[in-house]
Amino acid sequence: MTESESADPRPVGPDGMSGYERARRALEEARASARAAGKSVGQGRASPSRRSSGVRRGGRRSWSGAGPDSRDPQPFGRLVGGIARERGWQPQIAEGTLFGMWEQIVGADIAAHAQPTSLCEKVLHVQAESTAWATQLRYVQAQILAKIAAAIGDGVVTSLRITGPKGPSWRKGERHVRGGRGPRDTYG
């Protein structure tokens, strides 16, 4: 064993180069071919600000950390809401929520005496059980609209059309006079 062999602990291959020298040569050849292809070479490590945010060169984060992240599990409602917005289902979902949660939105007292019948062009049609309740609901119309807007969003319902109960039909039989005389003074 010679003195030069004992001083260099790196093993030498058949080509006379150590593993380190072979790796260094391969790196230089790769850099030269990248330069020839027009790529930027020798950028070194990421800047400290990039390293602290956990973002790799490819734009992916290496860790999510303690805060919310797009890779975290998402609540089902948020995912469904995003799909509904993308596909334009928001008006139908808002209408379904209004009709399904009518009692929670307007309160048990109003819901016991009035029900929504339809929603056409942002006008909610509500039918009250009596003319007295219809009149009372017209007085609190602004509060009802505010409760609806708070529950399902602004702009879904812009006005209410409140009607009382339907009157009895006086049409008896096949033959009748259109716009006929009606009951006259039988209720007087």
Image (cartoon, grey):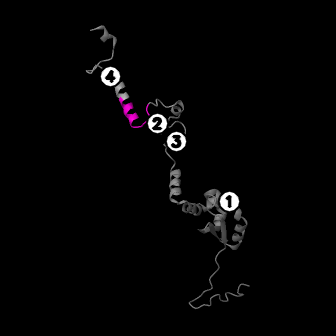
Element assignment for label 1 = helix
Q: Which mark is residue 19?
A: 4
Q: Residues within 10 Å of mark 1 (few under 14, many from 20)?
A: some
Cα–Cα span, label 3 and label 4:
42 Å
> Which residue was labeled with disc 2?
57
Q: Residues within 10 Å of mark 3 (few under 14, many from 20)?
A: few
Q: Position of residue 37 (x, y in %)?
A: 39, 37
Q: Can you say which quadrant of the picture contains the C terminus?
A: bottom right
| Whether residue 107 can be seen here | no
Up-down relation of residue 55 to residue 103 (above or below): above
Q: Which mark is residue 83?
A: none
Cα–Cα span, label 3 and label 1:
35 Å
Q: Earlier in the sequence, mark 2 or mark 1?
A: 2
Cα–Cα span, label 3 and label 2:
18 Å
What residue type is disc 1 on? Answer: Ala
Up-down relation of residue 132 to residue 38 (above or below): below
Element assignment for label 4 = helix
What residue type is disc 3 on? Answer: Asp
Q: Are marks 3 and 2 in contact (CB under 8 Å)?
A: no
Residue found 68% across the figure and 73% down from its top: 130
Cα–Cα span, label 1 and label 4:
77 Å
Mark in front: 3 vs 2: 2
> Which residue was labeled with disc 1?
146
Magenta span: 29-41
Of residues 110 and 9, which is closer to you in this image? 9
Mark in front: 1 vs 4: 4
Element assignment for label 3 = loop
Main SS, magenta region, reads: helix
Q: Position of residue 121 (x, y in %)?
A: 60, 68
> Which residue was labeled with disc 3?
69
